[in-house]
Image (tube, helix red, strand yellow):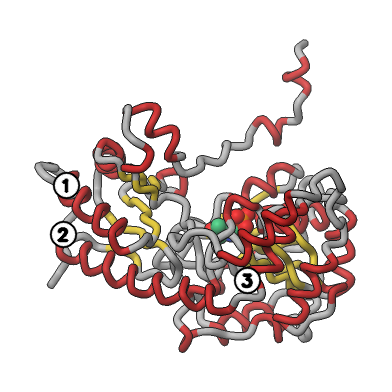
């Protein structure tokens, strides 16, 4: 018997995460110039790195012989001031994916159940399977979470429910009052992980205050990231907010130095720059209008999105994806999310969005099985 045969069955059963194609990889494969490639595949912020964060990170480089602050004091102070929550109720993550994993490791045991929606974020099944728990995917409704179906799927074995709002890769959004009623209906011994990675892109008229809910629902954890609207995806930094008791448990299974010192320095700086967040929001709003107007012109349908990407229907998505790559444009196929006829494109800068739309028009040329045309 080989050592790999000894790996637990639940580990062998994990389907690896499929990330967006890196620019350097496409450049290598197709002999393209990296500067000529447009990547709109991983919902990254097109604004470039925040100036204050860059200065803070450069300064922090000189201190890398030291371990980072394992308690993240400065970053927790910044979060505490910004969100009005005590430091004991904050857990820091190496990206918010880390926060999702901490929730799984602190609350799931083998054979217990985590619930999540069909077409929801791929990391929920990953972190569930990694601890040997059972993930149950609840059928979606119009590509979004069906909260009533999720409530109906709860059993005494359910320990965690993952909800993404807005959801990735569909961009769907749950109204705040509906969502709060859902949380109130979940038994108090089931952890609700509310993943709000895209919350800063939600139109202002639709925003709700999930942080205020934490006082009412001690079984709620809100997770946020600095990877999207704050523009620090490569740095890997996110955070979770919850009751002091839940956060304490998550901290026990956390690696002591999970957030590196440069990430902490960059995070503190960008958290102190609300103007950057506002610009991220505005640029995204304009880019979303540009992209959806372009898709409409090409007579394609899309799922209305409340995040920084939009998922559209093309029929033979893999052919279109490959043709876009040949034009130097990287988007995201989402067949692994059960959506083989769709592609997801992140909102870029105005010129990037235009490059994508032009390339898409070319890629659709002569396709025999385009989806039915949109009704006017
Ligand atoms: C991008 C994303 C995250 C954030 O991941 P990080 O680890 O913080 O980069 C979390 N949840 C969803 C649904 C996402 O799409």
Q: Is mark 2 within 8 Å of ligand 1?
A: no
> Image quadrant for the C terminus?
bottom left
Q: Crowding at label 3, few (<14), some or many (≥20) Cα neighbours within 10 Å?
A: some
Residue 366 screen position, x and y as percent? 9, 42
> Image quadrant for the N terminus?
top right
Q: For mark 3, what is the residue?
A: 151
Residue at the extreme top of the image, as rendered: 1
Q: Nearer the viewer, residue 164 or 115?
A: 164
Q: For mark 1, what is the residue?
A: 364
Residue 116: tell me if it is visible.
Answer: no
Going 83% across and 53% down the picture, which residue do you hit?
Answer: 68
Going 78% across and 73% down the picture, which residue do you hit?
Answer: 242
Q: Crowding at label 1, few (<14), some or many (≥20) Cα neighbours within 10 Å?
A: some
Going 36% across and 42% down the picture, which residue do you hit?
Answer: 35
In contact (CB < 8 Å): disc 3 and disc 2: no
Q: Is residue 297 left or right of residue 156?
A: left
Q: Nearer the viewer, mark 3 or mark 2?
A: 2
Q: Is residue 332 above or below residue 156?
A: above
Q: Secondary structure at mark 1?
A: helix
Q: Quadrant of residue 252?
A: bottom right
Q: Quadrant of residue 165?
A: bottom right
Q: Nearer the viewer, mark 1 or mark 3?
A: 1
Q: Is mark 3 within 8 Å of ligand 1?
A: no
Q: For mark 2, what is the residue?
A: 298
Q: Crowding at label 2, few (<14), some or many (≥20) Cα neighbours within 10 Å?
A: some
Q: Earlier in the sequence, mark 1 or mark 2?
A: 2
Q: Secondary structure at mark 3?
A: helix
Q: Is residue 40 above or below residue 167?
A: above
Distance in Å between CA atoms under marks 3 and 2: 39 Å
Q: Secondary structure at mark 2?
A: loop
């Amino acid at each position: 018997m080989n050592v790999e045969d000894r790996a637990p069955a639940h580990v062998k059963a994990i389907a690896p995460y499929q990330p967006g194609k890196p620019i350097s990889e496409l450049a290598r494969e197709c002999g393209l110039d990296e500067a000529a490639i447009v990547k709109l595949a991983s919902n990254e912020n097109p604004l470039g790195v925040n100036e204050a964060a860059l200065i803070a990170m450069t300064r922090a480089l000189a201190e890398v012989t030291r371990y980072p602050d394992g308690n993240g004091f400065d970053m927790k102070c910044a979060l505490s001031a910004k969100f009005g929550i005590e430091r004991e109720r904050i857990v820091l993550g190496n990206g918010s994916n880390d926060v999702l994993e901490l929730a799984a490791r602190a609350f799931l045991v083998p054979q217990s159940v985590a619930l999540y929606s069909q077409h929801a974020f791929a990391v929920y099944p990953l972190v569930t399977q990694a601890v040997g728990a059972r993930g149950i995917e609840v059928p979606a409704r119009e590509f979004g979470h069906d909260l009533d179906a999720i409530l109906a799927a709860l059993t005494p074995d359910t320990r965690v429910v993952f909800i993404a709002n807005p959801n990735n890769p569909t961009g769907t959004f749950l109204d705040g009052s509906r969502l709060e009623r859902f949380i109130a209906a979940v038994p108090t011994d089931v952890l609700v992980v509310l993943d709000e990675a895209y919350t800063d892109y939600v139109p202002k008229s639709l925003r709700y205050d999930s942080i205020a809910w934490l006082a009412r629902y001690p079984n709620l954890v809100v997770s946020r990231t600095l990877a999207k609207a704050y523009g620090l995806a490569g740095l890997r930094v996110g955070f979770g907010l919850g009751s002091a008791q839940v956060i304490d448990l998550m901290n026990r299974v956390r690696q002591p130095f999970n957030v590196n010192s440069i990430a902490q320095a960059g995070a503190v700086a960008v958290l102190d720059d609300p103007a950057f967040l506002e610009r991220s929001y505005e640029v995204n709003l304009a880019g979303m209008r540009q992209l959806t107007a372009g898709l409409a012109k090409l007579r394609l349908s899309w799922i209305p999105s409340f995040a920084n990407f939009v998922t559209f229907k093309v029929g033979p998505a893999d052919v279109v994806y490959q043709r876009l790559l040949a034009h130097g444009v990287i988007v995201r196929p989402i067949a692994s999310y059960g959506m083989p006829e769709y592609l997801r494109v992140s909102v870029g800068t105005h010129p990037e969005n235009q490059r994508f739309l032009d390339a898409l028009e070319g890629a659709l040329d002569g396709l025999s099985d385009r989806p039915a045309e949109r009704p006017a």
